Amino acid sequence: MNSRDQLRSNVIATATTTAGVSTSTISVSDTIKRRIENTTEGLSSECYRLLHNRVLAANKENAMLICDYITSLRSEVNPSEGHRENILILAL
C-alpha cells in the first residue's frame, strides 16, 4: 500500500469515528431533552426553562435526578400540576 492509499484509509477511518461520536452525542442530548419535556409536561414554560437552562447546564446528573423524582412522584401519587410545579421550583 502506498502512502496515498494509507492516508486515504486514515481519513476515512477518522471521518467514520467522528460521525459515530456526533450521532451518539446528538441522541443523548435528544433523550435528555425529551425527559425534561416529559417531566415538565402540563407545567409552565418557566419550569422547563429552569430545568433545561439552569440545572442541565450546570450538572446533567442533577437534572436527571430531578426528572426521575418527578416521574416517580407522578406514577405513585399523581399530584396536581400545581404541586409538581411547586416541588420542581423548590428543588431548583
Image (cartoon, rainbow, N blue to C red):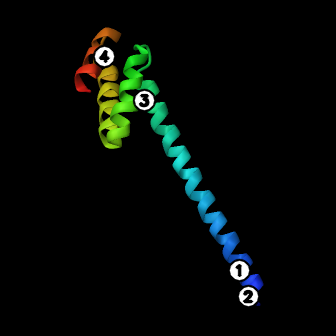
In the displayed structure, 76 sits above or below 28; it is: above
Residue under label 1: 7
Q: Which mark is residue 84?
A: 4
Residue bearing mark 2: 3
Q: Residue at x 71, y 80 (%)?
A: 7
**Residue type of the residue flagged with mark 1:** Leu
- Check disc 4 and give the amino acid type: Arg
- Ranked by sequence position, the earlier of labels 2 and 4 is 2
Q: Residues within 10 Å of mark 4 (few under 14, many from 20)?
A: many
Q: Which mark is residue 36?
A: 3
Residue at 30% x, 16% y is 84
| Nearest to the observer: residue 67 or residue 5 | 5
Label 3 secondary element? helix
State the separation of the CA atoms marked 2 and 4. Answer: 63 Å
Secondary structure of the residue carrying numbered label 1: helix
Furthest toward the bottom, the residue is 1
Residue 87 vertical position relative to residue 28 in the rendered view, above or below: above
Residue 49 location, quadrant: top left
Depth check, mark 2 against mark 3: the one in front is 2
Indicate the secondary structure of the residue bearing disc 2: helix
Q: Position of residue 85 (x, y in %)?
A: 31, 15
